């Protein structure tokens, strides 16, 4: 547990102070303020309640960043711990700890900028492809508990993901898989009905 905490601290520190060796003349973008403060566990805290969320600090202009795009709902920055040249993040200005806790309208605002930003990133990096990635939850690799979308530019044979070399096998259509599909459809129906009951006007899901 202690090793995991040290690893998280190191990653967070890389976001807080990524450009220590950069020239002092590097232009950092000033960002609008966010109303939230949150801890490493993704829960909201008061100003005195511990370390603030790294992305909220960036939004408030309290941590350096290289801003690529900004509007009323979200901003896009270069990842300060990139997987590759041009790795960018789209971040909502309001704090939500995970994608499933983020309102659909905010997700829509973020996703609506993907074509514009990804095309700009690919053009600037000379790439012709990109991965769109969300790490949602600790087991999926989420380290900063403030919803964000990764745009990762790709080139042929860059060998970025070792999983791309893994052999994929066809889905076996047996009773176990059928039960899994049934359970997912049941969950979708339940969650959709729950959203409708809250009066949010969710679109009804059609399942076959």
Image (cartoon, helix red, strand yellow):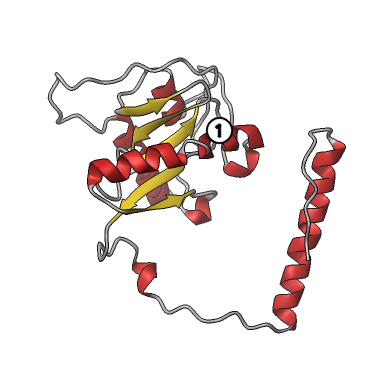
At x 52%, y 56%, the residue is: 139
Quick check: 104 above or below 186? above
| Quadrant of the drawing holding the C terminus | bottom right
Q: Is residue 82 left or right of residue 59?
A: left
At x 54%, y 17%, the residue is: 35
Instruction: Return the x and y of residue 169 as percentages of the image width and height.
Output: 51, 81
At x 30%, y 50%, the residue is: 83
Quick check: 200 above or below 155? above
Q: Residues within 10 Å of mark 1 (few under 14, many from 20)?
A: some
Residue 116's image quarter? top left
At x 55%, y 33%, the residue is: 109
Q: Which residue is situated farthest in the right direction here?
A: 197
Quick check: 52 above or below 107? above
Residue 45's image quarter? top right
In this view, the residue in front, 150 or 130, is: 130
Determine whether the residue tagged by mark 1 lies in a helix, strand or loop: helix
Instruction: Return the x and y of residue 157 as percentages of the image width and height.
Output: 25, 66
The residue that label 1 is drawn on is: 109
Instruction: Return the x and y of residue 60 as percentages of the image width and height.
Output: 43, 18
Tell me if residue 146 can be seen: no
In this view, the residue in front, 100 or 87, is: 87
Quick check: 69 above or below 87? above
């Amino acid at each position: 547990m202690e090793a995991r905490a040290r690893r998280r601290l190191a990653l967070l520190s890389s976001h807080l102070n990524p450009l220590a060796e950069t020239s002092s003349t590097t232009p950092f973008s000033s960002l609008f303020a966010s109303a939230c403060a949150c801890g490493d566990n993704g829960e909201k805290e008061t100003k005195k309640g511990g370390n603030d969320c790294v992305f909220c600090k960036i939004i408030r202009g309290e941590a350096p960043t290289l801003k690529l795009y900004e509007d009323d709902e979200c901003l896009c920055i270069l990842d300060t711990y990139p997987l590759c040249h041009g790795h960018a993040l789209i971040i909502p200005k309001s704090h939500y700890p995970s994608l499933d806790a983020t309102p659909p309208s905010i997700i829509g605002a973020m996703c609506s900028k993907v074509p514009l930003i990804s095309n700009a990133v690919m053009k600037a990096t000379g790439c012709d492809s990109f991965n769109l990635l969300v790490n949602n939850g600790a087991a999926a690799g989420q380290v900063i508990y403030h919803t964000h979308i990764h745009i990762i530019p790709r080139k042929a044979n860059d060998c970025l993901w070792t999983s791309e070399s893994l052999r994929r096998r066809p889905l076996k259509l047996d009773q176990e898989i059928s039960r899994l599909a049934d359970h997912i459809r049941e969950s979708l129906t339940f969650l959709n009905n729950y959203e409708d009951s809250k009066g949010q006007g969710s679109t009804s899901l059609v399942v076959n």
